[in-house]
Amino acid sequence: MERKTNKQPKLHIRKGDKVKVLAGDDRGKEGTVLEVNLEKRRALVEGIKMVTKHQKPSAGKPEGGISKVEAFIHISNLQLIDPASGKATRVGRKQNEKGKLQRYSKKTGELIK
């Protein structure tokens, strides 16, 4: 009999969350999560880890040029900002009345979304 396990990893942040950067050049900055890559455990945060991208001229963009875009940052370098208190907090999981796991703030104890 094959064992049933959840193939998708559970992460402490999701798309749309407000997060604080804990490490790297952008340490201390805050931003909103635009995208999460589950396989690589990385997130794209608005205005964080800006990198220069050189674009070759193409039919769509004939002038080409250099542009600044956000790069992915590892999930371990991010901490969720509690919507209730506005401070960075650790995240836990507990079951709600329907038996589904729901995130909660370890600082205030309140459920998140």
Image (spheres, rainbow, N blue to C red):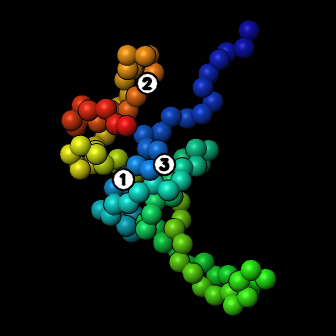
Res. 97 visible in picture: yes
The correct choice, above or below, for 82 with respect to 98 in the image is below
Query: Which label lies toward us, 3 or 1?
Result: 3
- Can you tell which quarter of the image residue 83 is in? top left
Left or right of 9? Residue 83 is: left
Q: Secondary structure at mark 1?
A: strand
Residue occupying image coordinates x 53% and y 53% = 35
Amino acid type, residue under disc 3 in the picture:
Lys
The residues bearing labels 2 and 3 have C-alpha atoms spaced at a distance of 17 Å
- Can you tell which quarter of the image residue 7 is in? top right
Residue bearing mark 2 = 101
Q: Secondary structure at mark 2?
A: strand
- Can you tell which quarter of the image residue 63 is in? bottom right
The residues bearing labels 2 and 1 have C-alpha atoms spaced at a distance of 21 Å
Q: Please identify the residue farthest to the right as the structure is shown.
A: 59
Q: Please identify the residue farthest to the top as the structure is shown.
A: 1
Residue occupying image coordinates x 38% and y 32% = 103
Q: Position of residue 110 (x, y in %)?
A: 26, 32
Left or right of 17? Residue 15 is: right
Residue bearing mark 1 = 19
The correct choice, above or below, for 14 with respect to 94 in the image is below
Q: Secondary structure at mark 3?
A: loop
Residue bearing mark 3 = 15
- Residue 27, numbered circle: none
Looking at the image, tell me whether mark 2 or mark 1 is earlier in sequence order: 1
Q: Residues within 10 Å of mark 2 (few under 14, many from 20)?
A: few
Left or right of 34? Residue 94 is: left
Q: Are marks 3 and 1 in contact (CB under 8 Å)?
A: no
